[in-house]
Image: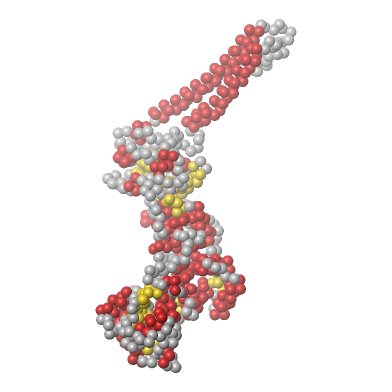
Amino acid sequence: MKPTKLIRKMLKTVLDGCSKVGKTSLIMSLVSEEFPDEVPLRAEEITIPADVTPERVPTHIVDYSEAEQSDEQLYQEISKANVICIVYSVNNKKSIEKVTSHWIPLINDRTDKDSRVPLILVGNKSDLVEHSSMETILPIMNQYQDIETCVECSAKNLKNISELFYYAQKAVLHPTGPLYCPEQKELKPSCIKSLTRIFKVSDLDNDGILNDNELNFFQRTCFNTPLAPQALEDVKNVVRRNMADGVKDNGLSLKGFLFLHTLFIQRGRHETTWTVLRRFGYDDDLELTQEYLFPMIKMPPDCTTELNHNAYLFLQSVFDKHDKDRDCALSPDEVKDLFKVFPYMPWGPDVNHTVCTNEQGWITYQGYLSQWTLTTYLDVQRSLEYLGYLGYSIIYEQESQAAAITVTRNKRIDLQKKQTQRSVFRCNVLGGRGSGKSAFLQAFLGKNLQGQRRIREDHKSFYAISTTYVYGQEKYLLLHEVMPDFDFLSEADLACDVVCLVYDINNPGSFEYCAKVYKQYFIDSKTPCVVIAAKSDLHEVRQHHSLSPHEFCRKHKLHPPQPFTCSMAEAPNKDIYTRLTTMAMYPHSRLRCMCASNRCTYCLCQNLLKLELLRSIKAQLRRTHSSFLTQALTLSSPPASLFCPSSRRCLLSPSLHPPPLRHMAQADLKNSTFWLRASVGATVFAVLGFAMYRALLKQR
């Protein structure tokens, strides 16, 4: 990311003051680099090009003449000015008195109190006196905070002419007012707050000290050049001499960091502090700019937003930075410490019931990443803002936080190609009141019914997000509980990857809502739907709907209602959530079975038919066919003895005469026929078993 600078197309400087103090002479001496022989009443407006100014900003200089301009024209120029130079004559006490009695009150009355124009006091004609006017001017500077500095110069001798306009530029681009309080000789609270955030972002290991590596990273980030080892030691020695606890363990503490910036400002190098502030996204009012917090990101329709790999690595480093006890969970104090760089606390108590937590109720590492994933999916602008507060673009040296976001492919393209690269899938959970939707969400986070009863009403969440594994790939499943308002479902309630229709098997009127919602919104939709028979540990009653849930699902070619309960003592089973994610990933594929254990009757039959049985049949037929051909074509004598495997009695001894060849062929043929019949019989038995399974399923 490039350093953030104050972008101005033009900097307007107005020279005010009493007549005969040399305003016009100063402008003409600057332009011609010599004192003019004849001075007009008012100089023409001039523009100094950007390439000849120290700050690379074009400067427009406007002269004021009391003889040629009206008060109304003066007021207009004041309202348009970025900086005003009040010129007085060092040998004219009346012009000095007019600074406080006339000019400063006039300017303050014509400018907004919230955005004061910086003032520069200019003492001209210093060549006419041997003494300085600073003793008279210093009390005035202490009285008015809008005065940035005072410059004594001479238009005749060209003394400090270019410095005058340099300070005028500096007063606009690097104002002292927001940073420093000259009366108390200390940084202002808003400046301390901004620099403290910068310190914490730069403290990569969160030990409260900027070590040499962190100081060098900070130096490169702000000024594009590292500090030499000796220069680092010199900086720390300056802090040591002036502040006892400014350096700890050979590193710069927060107090030492703030002291350095105080020293810069006191020595007139406040542009150094402003360079740091603008690099970290601050504007003239020490607020993070909208451009920094909310960079542009294109969001085509029917696409979603996810964090990319680098973003997860960054968030992992932030987690490790604040997980001081290394328990892979963030305690309330650790969460508070993490968000100290934010102007407000972004996570409320509902987050603890949106993501996975440990036994103490603390957000785990997986839950922490899940919450970031949820925020990015639902509100990418908010996610960009949070990453801005944490300094993602600075730490990872990116143009903006937008580099952390991946915009997924249009969902229609995924359906056409029958594959997706998305990692986050949304499941909207619909159902009547009391059907068990909230319990279904909390069970996804591993909370049984007993644990859910301890959740306060004002801490409940309508979202739950965690990871599931589909064919070895880690995916995020986002569950959203939709409020039961059948008369109106918004586009957000309908836009999802899979739908869960939850009903209470113990409530006879519960399924009616699911049936109406499905027929109203999803019967012609390509979004896969699953019916959840919640509270399956209770007695199932007949539903008031004209069709039973099983008949309804069979009629509309849906999976049979999936039983679900979370009233057991152990953690709820999560197989159904894996199936939901699979259906969201592959909406074009109809899953014939909803079991996750691969042990149901259907799965066993399929495995038997597709694997063991068919393979054995093929192998046996191949061996039998080969043996039959070999023996039919061979005229050699039979083996010495043939034994029956069951009785092990000798059927043919060498002393007996061998039977004819045709009898041998018939025996082999009978043997082959036996195996053929056995194979066909086993196949028929398996098919009949599967047919009986389907028939029993229909009767249920």
Q: Looking at the image, which is closer to me, 200 or 547?
A: 200
Q: Classify residue 106 as left or right of residue 306.
A: left
Q: The C terminus is located in which quarter? A: top left
Q: Looking at the image, which is closer to me, 416 or 249?
A: 416
Count of numbered badges drawn on the protein: 0
Q: Would you place residue 430 above or below residue 177 in this image?
A: above
| In the image, farthest residue toward the bottom | 130
Q: Position of residue 404 (x, y in %)?
A: 46, 55
| In the image, farthest residue toward the right | 655
Q: Position of residue 258 (x, y in %)?
A: 49, 74
Q: Would you place residue 154 above or below residue 628 in this image?
A: below
Q: Would you place residue 535 above or below residue 251 in this image?
A: above
Q: Residue at x 32, y 86 (%)?
A: 18
Q: Position of residue 264 (x, y in %)?
A: 49, 77
Q: In which quarter of the view is residue 582 placed?
A: top left
Q: Looking at the image, which is closer to me, 318 or 443?
A: 318
Would residue 357 be seen by someone viewing this image from the given angle?
no
Q: Looking at the image, which is closer to me, 225 or 618?
A: 225
Q: Residue at x 44, y 42 (%)?
A: 585
Would residue 557 be seen by someone viewing this image from the given angle?
yes
Q: In which quarter of the view is residue 173 placed?
A: bottom left
| In the image, farthest residue toward the front | 37
Q: How is the image coloured?
A: secondary structure
Q: In which quarter of the view is residue 250 placed?
A: bottom right
Q: Position of residue 13 (x, y in %)?
A: 36, 77
Q: Residue at x 43, y 64 (%)?
A: 342
Q: Residue at x 38, y 45 (%)?
A: 496
